Image (spheres, helix red, strand yellow):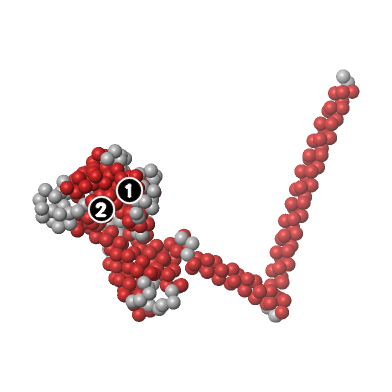
Amino acid sequence: MLKYLSFKDIFPTCKDLYHKNSSQNGLSHINGKIKTPCNNFDNSFRSNKQHNYNLVPDCTKFGPYLYKIKDYSEDKRKPYCNFFIYELKRLVRNKNPKFKKFDELYKKLIETYETADVKGLDICNDYISLMNDTVYDIFEKFDKLYYNFKDLRSEKNNKHVYVNECVKKYEELIKLDKTKINSTIKEELDKFKSDFHNYLRVSENKYEVELLNSSLGKLDTSATTAEALSGGTTYSVTWTSTGVLFFAILIIIFIVYNYTAYGTYLRPGKRKLKNMWNKKNKKHDELINFFERTQKNIIQNKHNILYNSVEYS
């Protein structure tokens, strides 16, 4: 199960692709093919008038989405398939009455695309069995976490509201037992925390009250590592600080050595290092001279042999 299930790199990238207009992806021709089959797909669930699901919009969005990712490598496709099963499950849960068979809906959806001669969209087959209510709830929390973070960055007013929502969802996720569910939860939370703190550094607003006692407000080692790997500002600042500190130490040593009484304690050590260096260089020169003499003797011997052979021939 854990081979395929992952909560990493899904939001907002995969969600943005799903909600893109098919014309923006250059897939208008796919929409043209599946429009009528999607209407038939929707009608197949309307035999009972109470079941007014209106599945056409979902059917016409899933098709281009799956078509877009079908040529991705298995590794690259992984987050997109994980988002697909979440979005399909969300569709099932939000309908009233609810679908009883999630996997059956998926099969009918793929069959619908095949009738439109749009094949090869069953690329997420292995992921369907991974979805359950627990997994769905985790995906939903991440979805809302990133949704509020997006609003925090885009909205001009009531930013503290979105900060509080981010803190709330982050706390819910951080309390989960990752060892029993999936280790990628922590990896994604570390990445989110890094992105969140990067935003706070450039934001003109202050949120100390909301963040003071929250897990999201504390930038720990794992989040700092995630930021460094993603090229975050903290990483470059750290290296700059290290460089400044290094040169400051060199300047202090120079002053102590040349202008204070403590320099007398350093000079014997300096002389010792210098003697060791000279001794090493002397041995190096002797070794080079030895090889040069050996090479010269070999050449001379070859010359003598050649000369003697010519003389006696």
Q: Earlier in the sequence, mark 1 or mark 2?
A: 2
Find residue 57 and name its label: 2
Who's the residue at 24% across and 44% down the image?
Answer: 36
Who's the residue at 77% across and 51% down the image?
Answer: 285
Position of residue 229 measured from the top left corner of the image (x, y, whole percent): 46, 60
Position of residue 250 measured from the top left corner of the image (x, y, whole percent): 65, 71
Whole-angstrom CA distance, mark 1 to mark 2, is 12 Å
- Is residue 219 or residue 17 the one in the foreground? 17
Question: Type of residue at label 1?
Answer: Pro
- Determine the image quadrant of residue 257: bottom right
Position of residue 287 measured from the top left corner of the image (x, y, whole percent): 75, 48
Find residue 273 and name its label: none
Position of residue 48 measured from the top left corner of the image (x, y, whole percent): 10, 51
Name above or below for residue 16 compared with residue 250. above
- Is residue 253 or residue 262 the one in the foreground? 253
- Residue 312 falls left or right of residue 160: right
Work out whether residue 21 can be spotted.
yes
Name above or below for residue 240 compared with residue 52. below
Q: Residues within 10 Å of mark 2 (few under 14, many from 20)?
A: few
Residue at image mark 1: 64
